[in-house]
Image (tube, rainbow, N blue to C red):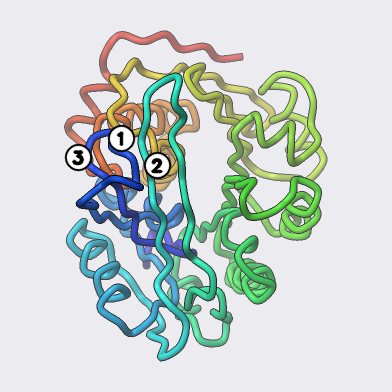
Amino acid sequence: MTGLVTFGETMLRLSPPRHERLETATSLAVHPGGAESNVAVAATRLGADATWLSKLPDSPLGRRVVADLNRYGLDVDVVWSDSGRQGTYYLELAGAPRETDVVYDRADAAVTSATADELATETIRDAELFLTSGITPALSSTLEETVGDLFEVAQEADVRTALDVNYRSKLWEPETARETLETYFPSIDVLVTPVRDAHTVLGEAGTADDVATALADRWGFDTVVITRGADGATAYHEGTTVDRPAFETETVAPVGTGDAFVGGFVASRLSGSDVGTALEYGAAVAALKRTIPGDVALVDREEVDRVVEGEHETISR
């Protein structure tokens, strides 16, 4: 049995060295980057058995994605396509007052035509948890339907499901995102969302505690996790709200921090930890990720344990 199966797009990220401008850069570093594969890599690094599903072009760039993810220790099960392309994005890192800029080049990516019929759904049926993010259905009408179909596959097999809202304003408007994501909510066991997305996209008001409780009551989620950036994270589970703070970190590369948190949280829960402990592991992986270039949290259990076991405040209500 596979512990975690994720589905989504992984792009190739092209970044100038240091904080150079894209328009003047003479070299670009290449890293794979995708919400669901980032989560799966982080979980794998903490000992979870994880598989990433997707559809990629049968091209050097598509094969590059698989080679990199395999190198990180992640199992992949992809559909190879003769049509469509490999999505890329360009990241120009910057310090204040200049803002970091992202330029996407993902139109007509092979993954946008992926259907449940062609994906390895037997892997989902044999998993403990199936996870995707709100990015995936925003990419095409086909993927909007596919995500719903995959949640149905998981439900029919009594596999737990998780959705990370992960709203991207460059992909869709808040109202459209809410309408689409709410169609999946009856099929979701674990919902993860930044508090800002809960306010802007899901229309919730109040503190993280208020939002977590309201979402769980309204939709019947088993667990709701609300991330609060530098202020930590809150989870509602079995009638109890638990808060954990973030860990101090020196930021080298912030991209992928949220995915790292989810990967740490999921891996901890799959290993049998309670929700409070899982929040701590998520926060520790997120803190470590911010010190690592690229999108992926290349961490190990020992260093995560060192962060978790350090001095930190915990609050439980």
- The answer to which of marks 2 and 1 sits earlier in the sequence is 2
Comparing 97 with 160, the one in front is 97
Number of on-image labels: 3
- Mark 3 or mark 1: which is in front? 1
Q: CA distance from mark 2 to mark 3?
A: 16 Å
| Residue contact between numbered discs 2 and 3, judged by CB atoms under 8 Å | no
Quarter containing the N terminus: bottom left
Q: Residue at x 49, y 21 (%)?
A: 232
> Is mark 2 in CB contact (under 8 Å) with mark 1?
yes
> With 152 as the anchor, is 54 left or right in this view?
left
State whether residue 215 is above or below residue 111: above
Residue depicted at 60% across the width and 65% down the height: 139
2 vs 3, front mark? 2
Dot 3 or dot 1: first in sequence order is: 1
| Earlier sequence position, callout 2 versus callout 3 | 2
Residue under label 1:
289
**Residue at numbered disc 2:** 256
Give x and y (percent) for residue 114. Answer: 54, 79
The residue positioned 51% from the left and 16% from the top of the image is 231
Write down the residue under mark 3: 300
Q: Residues within 10 Å of mark 2 (few under 14, many from 20)?
A: many
Closer to the camera in the image, 37 or 21: 21
Three-letter amino acid code of the residue under disc 2: Gly
Cα–Cα span, label 2 and label 1 = 7 Å
x and y percent of residue 132 in the render?
A: 54, 58
Q: Secondary structure at mark 2?
A: loop
